[in-house]
Amino acid sequence: MPLVTSEQMLEDARKGGYAVGAFNVENMEMVKAVIGAAQELRAPVMLQTTGSTIKYGSMETYAAIVAAEAKKATVPVCLHLDHGSSFELAVQAIKAGYTSAMIDGSHENFEDNIAVTKKVVDVAKACGIPVEAELGKVGGKEDDTEAEADTNTDPEEAKEFVERTGVSSLAIAIGTAHGFYVGTPVLDKERVSAVKKLVSVPLVLHGGSGLSDEDVRDCIRRGMCKANFATELRAAYTDAVKKLLAEHPETFDPKKLGVVGMEAVKNLVMDRMKVCGCDGKAN
């Protein structure tokens, strides 16, 4: 089917008490693996690209690949801009065919974050595209995005932010981090519950790679409707390729590398979809 926006799938998740898995993809093989997992489990799915991925392959290229693969699927597939760093980048994504966009103004102060987010929402809404924003700072580093410190989201500020910007979903900081964790993360899960009481839009969990299944499930029970996974997909793909080359160093066909990479990513994505509870939820 054609690409769909994230709005209905996240609203369904909010009402159904599960989360949509959102997976960062870097190449055609990862796109096929993620959509293949969604098709097999009958799950709605979001595929994401960050700014550095776009620099590597271009928005138009990723939009074309994802649209082509989604057309062959019978489950809802959304293409999302992850951590859009500017108004210009978000608009570029919408023009390229992305069906959901994030504007990440979390590095700005509260008022400036509201201003840039509202600017993106106004343009996106006219095009029928939902917008995700971030309030507070998720720690760690993901591609070109790096937080200097962890600053968890204030529930009252979240309420004001959503009301003034009109965003469709909100990523909140609760102690998660981008990349792999060093040590065991300590999550402020009560903050998810507190924000949910004041905010009506779906909440988004960033930094899902490396979290325990129980942590992810608990965050979802408390109100997270979208869970992002990136780093662990890259690791699974690369580890599978390394293993093949270690066992068969004579391998030179890129297709053979892609096959083992796809299988590893697909298996991981299916596991994460089951943890999110989105399996079997495709309309």
Image (cartoon, rainbow, N blue to C red):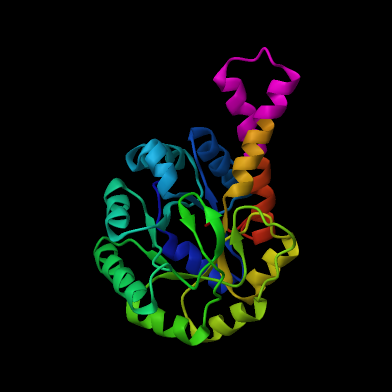
Q: Which of 68 and 80 is in front in this view?
A: 80
The outermost residue toward the front is 148
- Give the side of residue 195 with respect to residue 184, left or right: left
Q: On the image, which quarter does residue 215 sit in?
A: bottom right
Residue shown at 65%/76% (left/top)?
Answer: 188
Q: Is residue 92 above or below residue 171?
A: above
Q: In this view, does 105 lie above or below 64?
A: below
The outermost residue toward the top is 250
Q: Is residue 256 above or below residue 21?
A: above
Q: Is residue 257 visible?
A: yes
Residue shown at 39%/78% (left/top)?
Answer: 110
Q: On the image, which quarter does residue 228 sit in?
A: bottom right
> Over which residues does the magenta segment extend?
241-265
- Give the side of residue 232 with respect to residue 84, left or right: right
Count of numbered tags: 0
Q: Which of 80 and 44 is in front in this view?
A: 80
- Magenta stretch containing residue 249, yes or no? yes
Q: Quadrant of the N terminus?
A: top left
Give the percent coordinates (x, y) of residue 201: 46, 75
Q: Is residue 166 visible?
A: no
Give the percent coordinates (x, y) of residue 202: 50, 72
Q: On the image, which quarter does residue 67 sit in?
A: top left
Please identify the dominant SS of the magenta region: helix
Give the percent coordinates (x, y) of residue 220: 63, 69
- Magenta stretch containing residue 235, yes or no? no
Give the percent coordinates (x, y) of residue 20: 56, 60
Residue shown at 29%/63% (left/top)?
Answer: 124
- Give the side of residue 74 with respect to residue 183, left or right: left
Q: Nearer the viewer, residue 101 or 106?
A: 106
